[in-house]
Image (tube, rainbow, N blue to C red):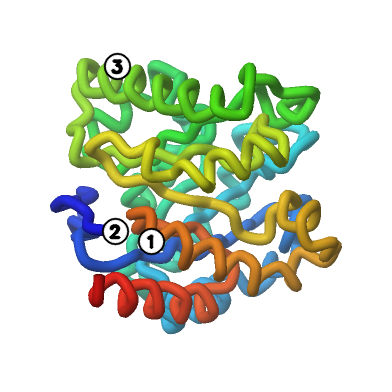
Amino acid sequence: MQVAMMTWKTPRRTLDLTHGGVLMGILNTTPDSFSDGGKYNTREIEHALRMVDEGAEIIDIGGESTRPGAAPVGIEEEIRRTIPVIEALREQSKVLISIDTSKSIVARAAIEAGADIVNDVTGLSDPEMASLCAETGVGVCVMHMHGQPLTMQHNPSYGDDGGVIHVVKHYFAERLKCLTDIGIDSECICFDPGIGFGKTLEHNIAILCGLSDLQLDRPLLLGVSRKSFIESITGERDPERRDHATAVITALAYQQGIRLHRVHNVAINLQSLQLGEQCGSHK
């Protein structure tokens, strides 16, 4: 698929997404994330640097699980989990750093520690978060979520299956206008359709098949890595064994113009992107 000129601006670097994809490596500093919770809590920096070596251009650091049914984490605890990791990674690498949080106090501390991007599953619905992002000029990722993590999978409904595309696209348009009116540069904004966040299997599939219909004039970030809808399709219960399925989705999404991909396994998804880019160049 031919894509128009597309960039995503952060204070440190502007990403050119026109002719190639970018991988955002996931670094959870939580004990209860669905895939790797607690696995890297004593060697976060080593894991982050490995993902950079494997091809990640962004490291997304989160201290609060947003898996379905997850309980909220206090501000002080979230800061304790994330800020030392951001500071240490910034000392050792020029990689773009994203803070995965919906709390403006945590985001400010992360930006001061060296973060370049705020990845907010609540879509910057907190006015203080939006004002902070406008003030600092960070890149922002605005995600669509139906409900809250604790309850979002309790019978989510969008009308018929096609309705989810309409609802999510309308949400993106509304947030783009609202955030730019507040003062956030549109070039700093990307959107995430929120696969698995208040959506059934049918909703997730509808979104994946209709990604090209969701794009406004801003890039989309896709986060499908190891998610439970893959188990619903393949029967694979072990999240780490869903990496190959994730990579297939990465390649298929690339063909629909998706250039930002949030993943656990950077190496295998880099190969998937390289194949997608090569095939796309011959269209």
**Residue at mark 2:** 1
Residue type pointed to by label 3 = Cys
How far is the residue under mark 2 from the one under mark 3? 30 Å
Q: Are marks 2 and 1 in contact (CB under 8 Å)?
A: yes
Q: Give the left or right position of residue 90, taking residue 157 as reference.
A: left
**Residue at mark 1:** 255
Q: Position of residue 61 (x, y in %)?
A: 52, 55
Q: Earlier in the sequence, mark 2 or mark 3?
A: 2
Residue most toward the left? 5
Q: Which of marks 3 and 1 is nearer the N terminus?
A: 3
Query: Which corner quadrant of the image does residue 156 belong to?
Result: top right
Q: Position of residue 81 (x, y in %)?
A: 62, 51
For mark 2, give the secondary structure. loop
Counting other residues with Cα less than 10 Å from the Cα at mark 2, is it few (<14), some (14-19), or many (20 or more)? Answer: few
How far is the residue under mark 2 from the one under mark 1? 6 Å
211 above or below 264?
above
Query: Which corner quadrant of the image does residue 68 belong to?
Result: top right
Q: Say which residue appears at 24% left-offset and 17% top-offset.
A: 182
**Which quarter of the rendering shows the N terminus?**
bottom left
Residue nearest the observer in this picture, 15 or 246: 246
Q: Position of residue 258 (x, y in %)?
A: 37, 54
Q: Say which residue appears at 24% left-offset and 76% top-offset.
A: 282
Residue nearest the observer in this picture, 104 or 84: 104
For mark 3, give the secondary structure. helix
Q: Earlier in the sequence, mark 2 or mark 1?
A: 2
Residue type pointed to by label 1 = Gln
For mark 1, give the secondary structure. helix
Q: Say which residue appears at 22% left-offset and 54% top-offset.
A: 3
On residue 178, which mark appears? Answer: 3
**Which quarter of the rendering shows the C terminus?**
bottom left
